[in-house]
Every structure is written in C-alpha cells, then in structure tokens.
Amino acid sequence: MSPAPDAPRFYTEQTLSCGAELTLEAGPSRHIAGALRLREGAALRLFNGSGGEYLAHITAVGKQAVSVTVSDYRAQDRDSPLPITLGIGISRGERMDLVVQKSTELGVSNIQPLVTERTEVRLKGEREQKKRRHWQQVAISACEQCGRNRLPAIAEPLTLKQWLAGATADLKLVLHHRSEQGLEALPSPASIALLVGPEGGLAASEISAAEQAGFQPLALGPRVLRTETAPLAALAILQFHWGDL
C-alpha cells in the first residue's frame, strides 16, 4: 500500500514500525475524532521525530482514543542540510511562540532560549518547565504542518553569558542593525549559531561579549526589525544562501 500524500500528519512519542497496532495520544486522538471527524479506514501519516514517516489507517475511533494500524514506511527527510542553532532572547506572549513556530518551518535545528539584560520574562522552576513544554508542542504542531520528520531541539533557558561560553558552530553571527556587514564576504559554513536579542535588543555590552566569543555582527538592511521578525528574516536568508530554500 503506497503512502497517501494528502493524509493528515500527526506526531506520536511511540515507537513506530510496520504492522504495529497502537492507540494515539489524547491530543491527536481528539483532533482526529473531533475536528477532522475521521472514521475507521481513514489514512494518516505518523512520525515520531526519529526520521521518516509511516502510513497508518484508523481501526477504531473514540472521543479520547483513536487506534491505528501502521503500514508503509517512507524514509523521507525534509530537514535542512545546514544545521542552525538559534539563540533567541525570550520575548513576551505570542512573540516567542511565533519565533518557535516559524523558525521550525524554516528548518532551524536547535532553539536556545536566552535570558539577556533586557529580557522581561523571568522563568523559574515549574513555570520554566511548563513554558518549555509549551514551546515544544508549538514546534511539534509546526512539524506536523510543514512536513518535517525531526523535531528541533528546544533547550532549557540559559543566560547569555552561559550560552556564549559554550556556543560552537562553524559560523557564529549576532544580529546588529548598526553593523554594515552582510553575508557576501563570508565563506560557506557547515553550521551556524545565530544570536538575536529580545524586545529592546541586545545591550552594547552583550554585543561586545558576543563578538569576543567569536560572533560576527550581521545587518539585515537599513530598517530595525522586531524581535519576532529579525530571526525569521535571518533564517530565510541563511537558508537561501547555504541551505535548501
């Protein structure tokens, strides 16, 4: 049986293999039964973040549980060949959600939330873990929509100082609208670390610290972009130059 290219896609944490029978988690089950109103025999595509996707068919539908039988495997990898780690100052409300969602669609490999001098959001303990789980779910939903079969890793929040001390990449960039340096003179990198500040941007001392840690300043044109716009514009440009856009 060949994969159904238009079948809805869902993420599961469970092990997938041809012939397996399993019950999907409550979230996707409710969406399948309630929003999509799919019934027995309908085709689905499933992935668990380890690469590739499986075709499955619904065998039973309940309000909180949908059972499926897994069939064909398709070894399709839609990740970018350019690994990019995004170090992003934590922003308020839906801005951070937007960055996580759209950067996932744009192929980012890792997202590192950062606490900077001008970060207004303070996360500790259970609130931090809850917010991180929320961001991971945003990334999962983005993967379901855009076709990625591997999830971007979302790390625990760090201070900017902590991240700069350990950030490694072939090319390290910090967005700085007062810089005049573009990408034209830079050689093609094997991996990139991209640093973007929160609302209000990075302080001058933080940009200086990033440069001392090997980050090169990068400007995206004459206009000052918002914290949710700047990383997405930069990721699109980087993927166009060296990735798969």
Image (cartoon, rainbow, N blue to C red):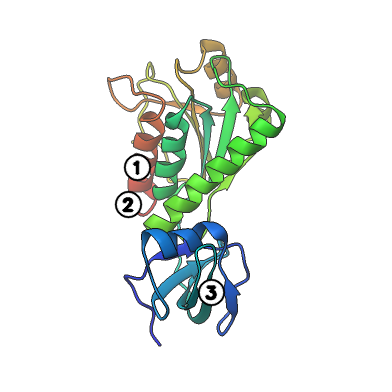
Quick one: label 1 or label 3, which is nearer the N terminus? 3
Q: Residue at x 58, y 48 (%)?
A: 153
Residue for badge 3: 67
Q: Quadrant of the N terminus?
A: bottom left
For badge 3, the amino acid type reads Ser
Gap in angstroms between the C-alphas marked 2 and 1: 7 Å
Q: How many angstroms separate mark 3 from mark 2 (CA)? A: 37 Å
In the rendered image of this protein, does residue 104 appear above or below residue 35? above
User: Type of residue at label 1?
Assistant: Ala
Q: Could you tell me if the residues under marks 2 and 1 are in contact, i.e. CB atoms within 8 Å?
A: yes
Counting from the top left corner in percent of width and height, residue 134 is at 55, 41
Residue 194 x/y as whole percent: 49, 35
Front position in the image: 176 or 211: 176
Q: Quadrant of residue 235?
A: top left
Few, some or many residues within 10 Å of mark 2 (<14, 14–19, 20+): few
Mark 1 and mark 3 in contact? Answer it, CB < 8 Å. Answer: no
| Foreground pick, 232 / 237 | 232
> At x 43% / y 51%, what residue is drawn?
142
Residue at figure coordinates x 38%, y 58% from the top left: 35
Which residue carries the number 1 mark? 236
Q: Which residue is mark 2?
A: 245
Specify which label sits upstream in the sequence, 2 or 1: 1
Which amino acid, mark 2? Answer: Leu
Q: Residue furthest front?
A: 63
Outermost residue toward the right? Answer: 125
Alpha carbon of mark 1 to alpha carbon of mark 3: how far?
38 Å
Q: Residue furthest bottom?
A: 1
